[in-house]
Image (spheres, rainbow, N blue to C red):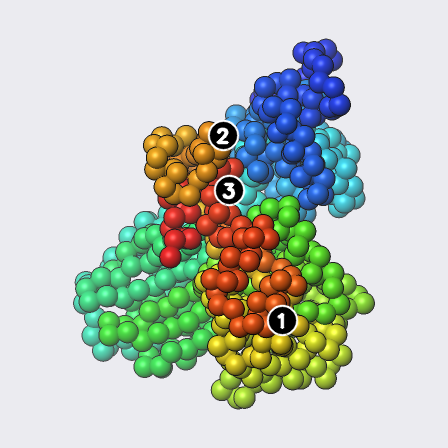
Amino acid sequence: MNDYRPPDAQRPSANPPSPGRHHGMRGLARRLVTDGLLVEAAVQRAEQEARESDSSLLRHVITTGLAPARQATLSAAWEYGLPIVDLDALRLENLPDAADYPGKLLNVLGVLPLYRRGHRLTVAVPYPSTLAQLDELQFATGLTLEGVLAPVDQLGPVLEAYLSRSESAMLDELADVDDAVGELQFDENVVDASDEQQAIANAGSDAPIVKFVNKILLDAIRRGASDIHFEPYETSYRVRFRIDGMLHDVAHPPFAMRTRIAARLKVMARLDISERRLPQDGAIKLKVSSARSIDFRVNSLPTVYGEKLVLRILDPSSAQLGIEQLGFTPQQRAMYEDVLAHPQGMILVTGPTGSGKTVTLYTGINRLNETERNICTAEDPVEIRVAGVNQVNVLPRIGLDFASALRAFLRQDPDVVMVGEIRDLETAEIAVKASQTGHLVLSTVHTNSASETLTRLANMGVPAFNIASSVSLIIAQRLARRLCPHCKQPADIPREALLGQGFSEQDVDDATLFEPVGCQHCTQGFKGRVGIYEVVPISAAMSQLIMTHGNAMDFDAQARQEGHPNLRRSGLFKVMQGLTSLAEVNRVTKD
């Protein structure tokens, strides 16, 4: 039991400032205008968009950057008479023990236990609508719950740190990465054949190496990395994390340790530690708490200076995202959901490696994953396991490729089929056949834009009439780093420069652009990533262009005519929303 009460928890007075008169506006909408956060026209648009996306007004205003989270949350607290708490003033060690509460449920709901008195638990919630979702947590804990509001930009990082603190209890005795590296400094930076044999013999029990590797893996999880690179060079060795799509140096162990580190990782991944001449693939499962384990996909590659190992961190939660969290505009989301509701057709997602195509596909799969549907997927490899979905790892070396898996699926009475990638004519033809015979097919194609996807299929040899009759929707996408809400600041960019970047006169007049700064909450001014999308449904006019063998420029012009913004324009819209910077959009969308 914990009787700690966080500071600055306060309930707005019973007689808040008069909201004034705004005809046709009620509740929080009127309050936001009265408090000077939004003008009436903006609030009315926000209400409409929130309804279209099945979201609350407060959530929509905050997630789209229309108003600062703290001021908007305070307005909501006044409007609904709810207590509000400043989480910047609390200390993690004063919160109730995280082991006493279901961490997965706390994360899903986005709520933070603040203090407990007897059988009453007070939790911080990001939105008033969250209060109606606390029944499951109340049932799981057997406690009576009371909710107080907390700005979501404060609540998110604190909740993440709170849960990480619990999950990392098994390794709390470890020092920082720098200290773990220091403990490796017991050899000179030279190595000979006898050292390599010793590394193999001691791979499972070399205590400093075990400690160092465990610490690196845990740090990568804590920092939200997607990949870990262990890289040997001529006289040096380094470890890098890929965070929000960019690689960052995190450690430089002694060069002499490269063989021992590689051997330890290969033991964990159940690879052949004596084989150092050929690439190998394996997997590691790291248990970080009694309720949670993290999977890593491991690949070793022999280089001229030793084995390089890359670990891909597989986060199941990324495949459980709702469509509303991807970053679609309301119109783009509606188009995606509309095609998902069709019993047949083909949805193609395109973009470079690491652009989030798999997550976009899985949000659709999760939407369709119901008892009455048979869903089959063929992937290379299956990175995220989903209950209720029949997932197949393709293994080309034994003849199980995408095409053969697709053929087998069609004999398995499927409703929905997902193919990891359409790489060749054979796979494309089977996917087309499936989409024309009563199946919904989802897949990816490696091109740069939606229009190029159609020409890519034609270049593979798929007949034009098959493309026109089977493809229903194309989504091109990129991932841009999201500006940290704690430290971003307005950017001073000349008007002429903005016009030259593609902004319209009205955009320049209305929008405030932001740039990264950097603080304790983020990495170089960015925290997380946001999707940038071009969503193009295949209309009758687009089908006609396909049948007349139009080129990518023709398809692109038709898409613009139908009102579907391209990746560049969608990226500029994210900049105007304050979600990312102009430089970041230039990085991911410029050819």
- In front here: 157 or 555? 555
CA separation, marks 2 and 1? 40 Å
- State the SS at label 3: helix
- State the SS at label 2: helix
Farthest residue toward the front? 548
Q: What residue is disc 2 on? A: 510
Q: What residue is disc 3 on? A: 573
CA separation, marks 3 and 1? 30 Å
Q: Quadrant of residue 190?
A: bottom left
CA separation, marks 3 and 2? 12 Å
Q: What residue is disc 1 on? A: 468
- Nearer the N terminus, badge 2 or badge 1? 1
- In front here: 479 or 493? 493
On the question of residue 347 being in view, the answer is no
Q: Position of residue 503 (x, y in %)?
A: 44, 40
Q: Look at discs 3 and 1 and give the one toward the viewer.
A: 1
- In front here: 306 or 418? 418
- In front here: 535 or 321? 535
Query: In this rendering, is residue 104 above or below 407?
Result: above
Q: Residue at x 30, y 64 (%)?
A: 231
Q: Residue at x 39, y 66 (%)?
A: 310
Q: Quadrant of residue 346?
A: bottom right
